[in-house]
Image (cartoon, rainbow, N blue to C red):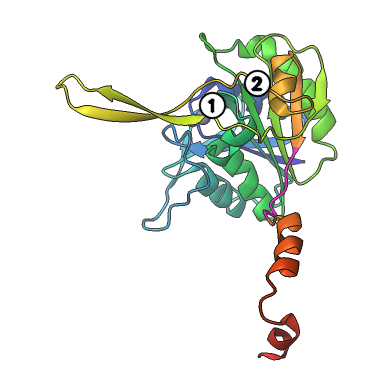
Amino acid sequence: MRILVANDDGVYSPGIAALAEVAAEFGETRIVAPDVEMSSAGHSITAARPLSYKRTPNKNVEAYRVNGTPADCVALGVSQWEKVDVVLSGINLGSNLGNAIWHSGTLAAAKQAALLGLRGIALSIPVPKDEPDFEMLKPSVREVLKVLLKESPRLLNVNFPHENPKGMLWTRQAVKFYDGKIVAGKDPMGRQHFWFTVAPLTETEEGTDLWAVERGYVSITPLRLDLTNEKDLALMQARRPLDDAADARKVG
Ligand code: MN
């Protein structure tokens, strides 16, 4: 099995080192990750300039750094290494739960794998204060990979709890609340500036990713690439019919 490991925290993050080390127990593993931190880059790609792909030291696996986004790294990594089976992204320093996954570069790397017809698994851990102890986390990462690497849906979002996990749960994305907001401040010169920040959510619904992690479980959410809202599609087709699809079929 060939495993490509990417992230959005950058190639030198302790999270990617820990993930690649455990992944290497399961198959041939290679790191391809951004040369600088690209957190919250979402699914952006670099289209206006070329990318470079440089070997970078790593004590356990072959590693490369790319002057691009997480999605760039996966697209480039897969093009330069034949027969990749699965792309792992992370372990991100910071949760990717609920609506936060729209901004997430960690998720974008996994999504890019799914877009290319491969499997993508994003992994994240909260960082409330200190950096997580990745040595302590490794057995849990091993357990998760044991469940997911052999056979899994196309796209998965995994979130570890801060403490030693109590177990693993299949969950759905918490979509009821949005935690991103703009906070105003002043720079040292007294000029106003703004931070796009995330306020912790306080209310969680049972069965969601947020809920599972709060209770100390590893949350595993299967995601899909199809963003179509089937309910709204059916509703609008009935309420406000547009042109006849039969006519469109005749065109061309
Ligand atoms: Mn990150």
Image quarter of the N terminus: top right
Q: Which residue is mark 1?
A: 58
Q: Nearer the viewer, residue 171 or 69?
A: 171
Answer whether residue 225 is magenta in the image. yes
| Magenta part of the chain | 222-227
For label 1, the crowd category at 10 Å Cα-Cα, with few meaning under 14, some 14 to 19 and many 20 or more, is some
In the displayed orientation, state which residue is furthest to the front: 239
**Residue 62 coordinates in the image, percent (x, y):** 58, 34
Q: Secondary structure at mark 1?
A: loop
Q: Residue at x 70, y 74 (%)?
A: 241
Residue 141 seen from this side:
no
- Regarding residue 7, the answer to whether it shows in the image is yes
Residue 162 figure quarter: top right
**Location of residue 96 with respect to 107 vertically, above or below:** above
- Mark 2 lies on a secondary structure that is loop
- The crowding category of the residue bearing disc 2, from other C-alpha atoms within 10 Å (few below 14, some 14 to 19, many at least 20), is few
